[in-house]
Image (spheres, grey):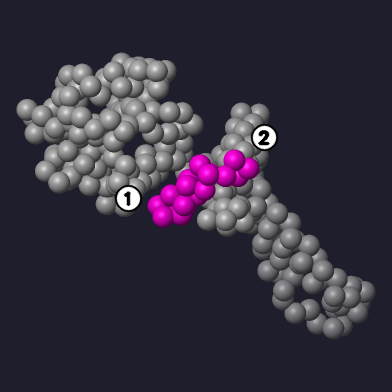
Amino acid sequence: MSCQENSTRIHGYLDGELDLVNTLRVEDHLRECTSCAQTYRNLQTLRSAVRGGGLYFHPSGDLAGRLHSALQEAAGARRPVPASTREAAKVPRRWTWQAMAALAASLAFVAVVLFRFAPGASRPSQSDIVAQEVLASHVRSLMANHLTDVPSSDQHTVKPWFNGKLDFSPPVRDLSTQGFPLVGGRLDYLEGRPVAALVYQRRKHFINLFIWPSPTDSGKQVVMRQGYNMHHWAESGMTYWAVSDLNNGELEEFVRFIRAQ
């Protein structure tokens, strides 16, 4: 992907609106191009400033009524007016269309403002954006044949490998007796920080378990994206995302084993 192509997709990527293929292409370009990566960071900073700086537009409660009245007036202005009436009132017909054009422009501006800045507009939540990042990382690890940096089924080999590479120590569990053998681990990058990715296997299905620190605990959430099952929860100071094309029942079983230990 060129820098010009990236510039046309970067806003959609920032808002989590791209499909999986374009998401992966943008992420690959951002890793290779320092200029575009800086542009992306600048856009992230700008969005954070807008969200945290009280710059959202809060429409008044009677806005819907006023818009409705304006539309009714515009509809009335489109009705033909007898020539005698126009001549008596000395209102040239062209002014009617000019007024309508001005009204249309005003309504279009209001619509844009509401869409871009009104709270609750149709934009992905932070959780949706993270879920898309997690899914992209899972698929990329399968496409690039880069499942592990440290291939090992021994938890006492995988866990120490992360020392010095992360600012936390991820819990690594051996689930081979439960039917989910450990394959290894690797470093990944999610939500703006390095994270641990532990890889488990169930028959021919791989499970990526992403782990990074979390300030708060949260209950488990289950989502499905593009045919992949995803389980998310936070406990004991850590955030967990388990993702796989494994059927949801067996992935649920895997999550129970992880949480039980």
Q: Is residue 15 visible?
A: no
Amino acid type, label 1? Met
Residue bearing mark 2? 55
Distance CA(mark 2)–CA(mark 1): 41 Å
Amino acid of disc 2: Leu
The stretch drawn in magenta includes residue 19: yes
Side (left or right) of 167 relative to 87: left
Which of label 2 and label 1 is nearer to you?
Answer: 1
- Provide residue 198's location: percent of width, then percent of height: 27, 31
Secondary structure state at the residue bearing disc 2: loop
Q: Disc 2 or 1, which lies upstream in sequence? A: 2
Image location of residue 220, percent across then percent down: 28, 30
Q: Is residue 143 left or right of residue 179?
A: right
- Residue drawn at point x = 43 percent, y = 49 percent: 24
- Reply above or below: 243 against 90: above
Q: Which residue is mark 1?
A: 143
- Circle 2 packing at 10 Å, graded few (<14), some (14-19), many (20+), is few
Q: Residue at x 72, y 76 (%)?
A: 79
Left or right of 35 on screen, residue 251: left
Answer whether residue 108 is visible to the viewer in this image.
yes
Secondary structure mostly seen in magenta is helix
Instruction: Tell me: residue 177, above or below residue 24.
Output: above
The residue nearer to you, when weighing 134 against 206, is: 206
Residue at 43% over, 28% down? 194
The image quadrant that residue 175 belongs to is: top left
Q: Quadrant of the C terminus?
A: top left
Which residues are drawn in magenta? Answer: 15-36
In this picture, residue 30 sits left or right of residue 114:
left
Q: Residues within 10 Å of mark 1 (few under 14, many from 20)?
A: few
Q: Is residue 67 above or below residue 150?
A: below
Q: At which x and y percent is residue 46?
A: 64, 36
